[in-house]
Amino acid sequence: MALPFLPGNSPNKHLGKERFHKSQHFDYSNGVPMLVGSEKPGVGGELLVGQKIKPKFSVYPKGQGSDLPSWVAFDKQALCFEAYFQEAVPEARDETYRIRKCKIYFYLEDDTIQVVEPECKNSGIPQGTLIHRHRIPLPPPNDDQFYNIFHFNINQQMVLYSRTFTVTNCDSFTSNFLTKLGVRLSDPTTVPDDPYSNLREQTEKSMKPLRPYERRDTLKQFLDHDRKVLRFYCFWDDTESMFGDPRELILHYFLADDTIEIREVIPPNSGRDALPKFLRRCKLPKNAPTQLKQPGQITDRTVLNVFASQSQGKRYILDSLKTGAVHEEFYKDCDLTVGGEVNVFGRRVLITDCDDFTKEYYRSKYGIEDFTPMQYKAPVAPKPQRLVPPYNGFGSEEDSLSSCQGLLPKPPQKDFCKFMEKDRCGLDSNVLNFRAKMVTTDPVDRERAFIISFYLCDDSISVFERPQRNSGVLGGKFLERSRVKKPGQELFKSELSEYFKAQDLYVGATLCINNKHFQLLDADEYTFSYMERHAEEFPKANVGNILSKLRSIPEEKQSEIRKFLTLSDPNNTGFIPYESFRGLLMGLDCSLSEHEVLVLGRHFSEHKQPEVDVGLMLAVAQDLLKKKSFEEFPDMARAFTYHDRHKTSRLSIKETKTLCKAFRLPLPENLLGGLLSKFADGDEIDYHAFLAGINWVEYPAPPVMPEDTLKFDVKARFDSSGAEGKNISYSALLGDVFSFPSNNGDPTNSTST
């Protein structure tokens, strides 16, 4: 009964099949149509009737190891088998067959096989690689297949190109690898004896050659000590000869072959020619000079003439006792010591010292610890002091001094490294600016204001006078930029004058510049910050030094200081005004300068940022943008909208700042940062409100005064809102100086530590 032709009931084998391609079985070979696809599968890759799968490579167990291909997983891995084969020798009298040992290498990455026979000395047959590395087919009738890993085992025969090999053993790696694959290995077998090879070994052992050689193996010494050289500093006293003088030498001892080389140290202006070597590299005999040896007297081996006849010739044998040998001693490393002598062909050379490598070599090999250098010459006489004539008044002192140091005067060299390190770099000017006044009894000069600038790159000083209305004094440049000498120095002297340095300038210091006394009253923010950052260079700005001065206060005054600080803070806030703090420190006997008090006040001051009106900030920003004619607000709005991927009308502060810099928004950094912080809601900014606030075209703000613009422009050079306008945290000061915290209770109950 036939089944209905319905899905699931039909026996058609093509149901569910997806591949129906056909293999190409016919092709033209040399113009003749032929069947070339006998091994190709049928439709869809299915095997034809009687067709078998012929694997190309070995199949390894699945589920073990990585999924890498075999040429990666088994790279540089090979199985090694020991084998032999028997070869017939039909035309030889001494042997009828020969056993030849070899090794079979199976490479796991591509199933290739290589057969190598170890070379035997004087075998007379070609040896080495018998079969080059490639895939070897199986013997007929399976010659269409190749050997794989499962064809190998111990104590079995393998036919490789009609030559039968017997596998006898394998190495440990091969044994472990095959065992993990599930191959049961047989027991190792022995290689049969080769009669002819045994005969040759017996013959070689019984042979006594007529010319035996004594082999001296120096390769080990060369490999162990190659490029290792001992260096000794030597001295040769040649003063006894005519025109002779002491000679300094360097002796090199080569550990690789026990040879010695000597070079001469020729001092400058000695009048001697710079010869390459004092003694060429050779073995140095101990008893030189000796009588010249005859040719053949010194040989590596000696022989005896035991028989001589005109008819039968001469017979020689080796002199094993070396009765006629000439022995000559050479210097070894054990003969060279610091303080010893070396006979260099009749010249008495003293070893005075050696280098660190030589000391370590003798310390490790011979246990020598005493390497005291030998004093062989008188100490060098001190050079007489060169007296420099006093300054003559022409040019600078350095220029006049250089004319006394040589026949050809050279311009004085400046400190180029200091110039490159301290020169202006970007916004870092490396210039210290101080506000100063003139110390004088003249009431007009007393009101004049000066700015003293110190340039760190070359220690030069310039003085600029601020112009003042109705003062009767013209402002401008008061002193050209130059180095300024310290007062009280003699003009015409041999020593160089001392100039003002950066450490001499601080708030409260008095400088004498061209017989004019200036007192430094204040400094700009950059000067204070630079001196505090480089406190190791400026002692007046080192907080640690200032606190150490305060710690030297006697204990009886510490309680009074605590009472004063507590009474100065009636509200128990822990802070006091700067003026009270300054008056307290200046009244102590700890020699604090005005600059040190300012640094201490800046260190313990209350850091509060004053609140600024947002409307004023927007008005100042619009005023600056209007002066710069900046009108790219529509383009900025499109850029902000493009970067707003989620269409939330918000961007991060970083992205907003980047876009403002991309459009080159002409606003100061502090003003732009303040506006972004005002419009920020967390880490995001409503860019529509920000753009509307700075858009002076559509939403103009009321005009601002010039002094309001200066608040957000570049910071004033001398800002009076430093430590003077802040409160000082005296509780932190007490904790750092006197090691006791602040107590806002009754000051009469406070005790000092």
Image: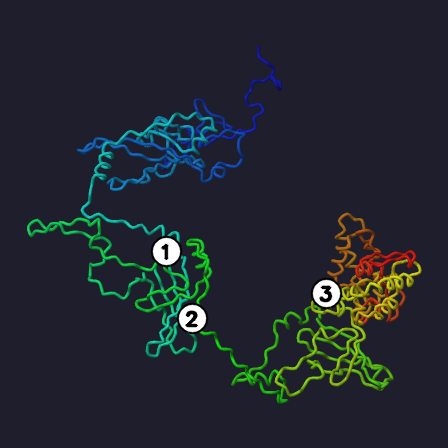
* Mark toward the viewer: 1 or 3: 1
Residue closest to the eye, 345 or 42: 345
Residue 466: x %, y % from top left: 81, 80
Position of the N terminus, as image quadrant, is top right
Q: How is the image coloured?
A: rainbow
Q: Amino acid at mark 3?
A: Arg
Residue at disc 2, secondary structure = loop
Residue closest to the eye, 718 or 697: 718
* Residue topped by disc 3: 533
* Mark toward the viewer: 3 or 2: 2
Residue at disc 1, secondary structure = loop
Residue at disc 3, secondary structure = helix
Q: Residue at x 90, y 61 (%)?
A: 566
Mark 3 and mark 2: Cα distance apart in space: 54 Å
Q: In the rendering, which numbered label is found on residue 256?
A: 1
Residue 347: x %, y % from top left: 33, 69
Number of numbered discs present? 3
Q: Amino acid at mark 1?
A: Ala
Q: Is residue 279 above or below residue 174?
A: below
Residue 709 shows in the view: no
Q: Residue at x 30, y 40 (%)?
A: 119
Residue 427: x %, y % from top left: 72, 68
Q: Amino acid at mark 2?
A: Tyr
Mark positioned earlier in the residue sequence (3 or 2): 2
* Residue topped by disc 2: 376
In the image as oriented, which residue stretches furthest toward the left? 311
